Amino acid sequence: MWSQGRFPREGLDGDHMHDFADKTLELGFRHVEINYVIPPDGVELLLEHHIGVSSVHSPSPRVRMPDGRLSDAYNLAATDAEERRLAVERAQVTVDYAVRAGSPYIVVHLGGIGGEIFAEERQLRRLYDEGERDGEQVEALRRRAAERRREGAPAYLPNAERSLAEIAEYAARKGVAIGLENRYHFHEFPGIDEMPELLDRYPPHVAGFWLDVGHAEVLDRLGFIPHTRWLDELALRCLGTHVHDVDGLADHRAPGHGTADWDHYAAKLPPQVPRILEINQKIPEDQVAAAIPFLRRRGILPPSPIRSP
């Protein structure tokens, strides 16, 4: 995510992934997650580099689909059979790239109810930014959003389940585990009550939960899901995490530049799962580098090893 627009190639589209990987190592990181916005030639450049690949975010690489949309616009829960089929196909391509990269994980967005944010959520976000977080209007919007989700889920959730089954069957044969990410918008799957039901069908080496700290914080601030529920209830199925800070409802900030509940994540995150610093391309290099010591101080990363003189 951070690479976008930061490493231009003269006369070419996209960023130079060798330059990105070199800078990543310089800033103190030894692995990267291949994001779904990277085009095929950029992914190939990353695979050529000696930097490690912790995970690959599906659907990677980003390609233009037959109808002109980009691959990450396709919905794994779509009611249109062809769209869903193509979305599954792109996730399976991601699995193949994970195998080539030597990565044990792909991260999956499982789709949602339609392709648009609920109007009620959009209004809640506007009210939040204006300082209105409680009251009759806010509660009414939350109730209507919850009703819309309950009414819409039966048409879409079975398709998401079918897509997951098809991706899981393919990934299991290749030795790659699927991390289902908690999402940024309320209409998206899986919700907190859907996640355990989906995961119960698969052993931990096939599918698990991928915590996105910023998404958990934002849906809590909007009054939909307490951020603590994800790890309180699903820590044993957690495969990895996207770590970023949140300023109001703006996520993908460098850790230390927001108000995320780091004490909770330090206490609840399984120690062995990878921590992926998922921050946006506007974050300056000094904040990226400073995130490592910040996360060590807050207990999200282990302390630096003591070196002998």
Image: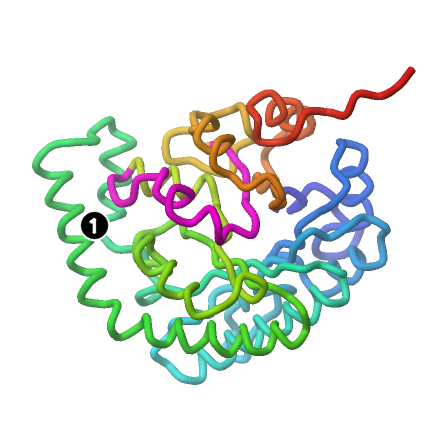
Q: For residue 71, which quarter of the picture?
A: bottom right
Kindly identify which residue carries mark 1: 120
Q: Residue at 26% x, 55% y: name it.
A: 118
User: Residue 82 appears at what percent x and percent y?
Assistant: 45, 84
**SS class, disc 1:** helix
User: Residue 103 appears at what percent x and percent y?
Assistant: 71, 59
Q: Residue at 74% x, 46% y: name it.
A: 8
Please tell me which residue lies in front, 42 or 238.
238
Magenta stretch bounds: 222-245
User: Residue 165 appears at what percent x and percent y?
Assistant: 47, 76
Farthest right residue in view: 309
- 196 left or right of 253? left
User: Residue 304 appears at what percent x and percent y?
Assistant: 73, 25
For badge 1, the amino acid type reads Glu
10 Å crowding of disc 1: few (<14), some (14-19), many (20+): some
Quarter of the figure with the C terminus: top right
Farthest bottom residue in view: 82
Q: Would you say residue 101 sits in the magenta stretch?
A: no
